[in-house]
Image (spheres, rainbow, N blue to C red):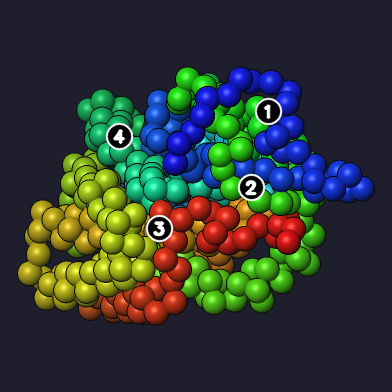
Amino acid sequence: MTVQPTQLSSATTQQAVAPVTPDDDRIIETSIPVRLDNLSWSRFHTRVVLALGITWILDGLEVTLAGALSGALKDSPTMNFSNADVGLASSAYLAGAVLGALGFGWLTDRIGRKKLFFITLALYLSATAATALSWDVASYALFRFLTGAGIGGEYTAINSTIQELVPARYRGWTDLVINGSFWIGAAMGALSAIILLDPAFLAPDHGWRIAYFTGAVLGLIVLLMRMWIPESPRWLMIHGYPDRAHKIVADIETSVLGREQSSADFEKIRLRMRDHTPLREVAHTLFSAYRQRAVVGLVLMSAQAFFYNAIFFTFALILTDFFGVAASNVGWYLLPFAAGNFLGPLLLGRLFDTLGRRTMIMFTYGMSGLLLALSGHLFSIGALSAQGQTVAWMVIFFFASPAASAAYLTVSETFPLEVRALAIAVFYAIGTGIGGVIGPALFGALIDTGSRNSVFAGYLLGSALMMVAAAVAWRYAVAAERKSLESVARPLACVE
């Protein structure tokens, strides 16, 4: 496609978003989606990846500290946690994430992506700092709940923004790598735990508190980086701000190409602008018009939530209770685990855009389930050392990490723009409620039995869920690779 340079002018603006019916100024014609997808990768997109990825790095730091600090909380003379308390606190975090995703997801579709960035981040930072001041199990669980609520809101706003700003041909890899950057933060959290939990460096009741304060301080950096990201032009054009949407796209084009693309060179879509989408229409869209996609999203989210959260939130307990690893040394074992989780999306992510969504989702979910069952059997018969168990987790999550990210990718790109954030929220909430909240509490109880076979039974359940998800994805998932969002899921505001 040949793109002719044009001058920035009011005429060009009107051409891009001109009303087509004089009697109804709520109907516009726009080429904004196609123009965004026509762009090649640029420094602008790199800045978006950095600004969104650093949030996931911070989340990885936060969650990893919670897992790595579980041993310190058990040893703390003030907190004196049991394994069940650790599982309860982890479930409280995930419960907060569920409710936060639902509430903030609705607001993300209602008031925009950019505003939610700052609201959810403020909640996250304040709750993380408060966690450092916890005085008992109840207060710790409450602050973890609030921290989770902030992170739940981040999931919806960030994944929506990724889809709506990144060109279609890069969308899969970008989404997976940004979500996978969580594990860079996990590695940072592991290293921090090694230092802060060293009794020769800090008292047992001080290290974990400083760790949470450090996470809150680092989060302030994100506030500055969020300034780099504009509001989604796709959201603006539907919600009654076509001129603002055009200006943002023109600025992006100028930064990428040195000029604005001509709207006349691109196919346009007709939209009826709306202030919001009624919840009744949202429910009809998610559970009636797109029922099959809803089932796929729910299955993928539930399976990966149980698989991930059950293992990740209790990995420190496995190492300390079954392998005798000191709590202060748990961080060393997390480093290879984090490496596998980041390398998976980085190395396999491009295949989601080339081989396709269905093939890669089926493959990654299936491999994760098979490998967990195999390693679980080896664990149950005592064939693995602490190092061997860590290597097994590293290999398993090399495949499980892109699988988990693909669940968010699937939900965020296969529903219409008007309900995208809430769709992510609903399926994240249901999936995490079913799999994520139950998983850590269940595994905490299984570990408390001291029986390897009991833990193996939990691993088999996680494996079975991943295998079922693989089959469902192969049969019913949408082949959305390299396609515009509007062709994958037609906006509700489209006018024939």
Disc 1 vs disc 4: which is toward the camera? Answer: 1
Coordinates of residue 268 in the picture (x, y in percent): 63, 47
Confirm or deny contact between disc 2 and disc 3 (CB under 8 A). Answer: no
**Amino acid tagged 3:** Glu
Q: Compared with residue 36, is residue 426 higher up or lower down, i.e. above or below?
A: below
Q: Secondary structure at mark 2?
A: loop
First in sequence: mark 3 vs mark 4: 4
The answer to the question of whether label 2 and label 4 lie on touching residues, with beta carbons closer than 8 A, is no
Please, what secondary structure does the residue beneath circle 1 have? helix
Q: Which SS class for mark 3?
A: loop
Dot 2 or dot 3, earlier in sequence? 2
Q: Which residue is mark 1?
A: 12
| Residue linked to disc 4 | 188
391 vs 104, left or right, is left
> What residue would you read off at disc 3?
481
367 or 97, which is in the foreground? 367
Q: Does residue 310 show up?
A: no
Tell me the distance, in whole angstroms, between the alpha carbons under discs 3 and 4. 33 Å
Q: Quadrant of residue 246?
A: top right
Instruction: Quote the CA–CA distance across marks 2 and 4.
Output: 46 Å
Dot 2 or dot 4, earlier in sequence = 4
Gap in Å between the C-alphas at discs 1 and 4? 48 Å
- Label 1 and label 3: CA atoms lie apart by 31 Å
* Left/right of residue 359 with respect to residue 150 in the rendered view: left
Q: Which residue is mark 2?
A: 268
Residue drawn at x 23%, y 78% as measured from the top left:
453
Q: Nearer the viewer, mark 2 or mark 4?
A: 2
Q: For the residues labelled 1 and 2, say whether their Cβ atoms are less than 8 Å apart.
A: no
The number of numbered badges drawn on the structure is: 4
Indicate the secondary structure of the residue bearing disc 4. Answer: helix
Give the spatial CA distance, label 2 vs label 3. 21 Å
